[in-house]
Each structure stands twice: as C-alpha cells, then as structure tokens.
Image (tube, rainbow, N blue to C red):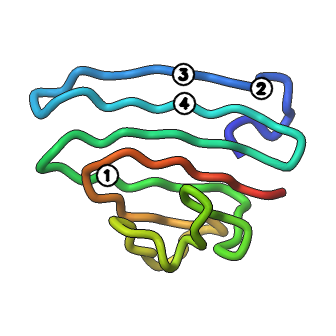
Amino acid sequence: TPDPTKQMTWAKGFYDSMYGRIESEWRLEKEGWVYKTSIPPNTSATLYLDKATLNGITESGTKIKKAKGIRVQPSTDGQVVLELASGSYLFKIIN
C-alpha cells in the first residue's frame, strides 16, 4: 500500500522524461487503493505493489492476468511486480 498508516490518502505527480510525460496518482477509497499511471510511447515501466495479491487487482475492470500491456513478473518480498508497456492504466487494489 502507498501509505500503510493511511494518514496520507492521496498523491499525484509527474515527470517530463526525454521520452514524454510519466504520470502517477493514487488514492485511498473505501474498498481499497486506486492507482493511475501513464507511461510514454516506446518505453516501459515496472510497478511494485506491496501487500497485494493478483486476485485483488484489476486494471480498468479486467483481472490483471488478462489485462493488455501488462506482464506479471516473479513476486519479490511479498510484492506483486508488473511490467507495463506504454499507455495509461487504472488499477484497483482491493484490501
């Protein structure tokens, strides 16, 4: 989870890389966490989600294993590791 203490309930930011803008935003909702990200064309990113299970994650309403542009990588230290192709993503992580 972005803030396990749940004191901080949202964050938003961006970085203008030489390939384009990288955006990241998350917020705490009643059911769990919502995470939005945009990856510029011709690039990829690795997303690490703490204390999550694959069954509790969807991307734009689709189960993570069937979502386009996402490859599930081997888990490390209890984290879900996702390789993301360029594009925009909306993840929901149910507690």
Between the C-alphas of marks 1 and 4, the distance is 15 Å
Give amino acid for label 2.
Answer: Thr
10 Å crowding of disc 4: few (<14), some (14-19), many (20+): some
SS category of the residue bearing label 1: strand
- Which dot marks residue 45? 1
Tell whether 48 sits left or right of 39. Answer: right
Q: Which residue is mark 3?
A: 12
| In this view, 66 is above or below 70 | below
Give amino acid for label 4.
Answer: Glu
* Quarter residue 73 falls in: bottom left
Quick one: 47 or 90, which is closer to the camera? Answer: 90
Q: Which residue is mark 4?
A: 25
SS category of the residue bearing label 4: strand
* Quarter residue 28 falls in: top right
10 Å crowding of disc 1: few (<14), some (14-19), many (20+): some
| In this view, 19 is above or below 7 | below
Q: Which residue is mark 2?
A: 9
Quick one: 8 or 57, which is closer to the camera? Answer: 57
The quarter of the picture where the C terminus appears is bottom right
Q: Are marks 4 and 3 in contact (CB under 8 Å)?
A: yes
Q: Earlier in the sequence, mark 1 or mark 3?
A: 3
Tell whether 37 sits left or right of 39. Answer: right
Q: Earlier in the sequence, mark 1 or mark 4?
A: 4
Give amino acid for label 1.
Answer: Ala
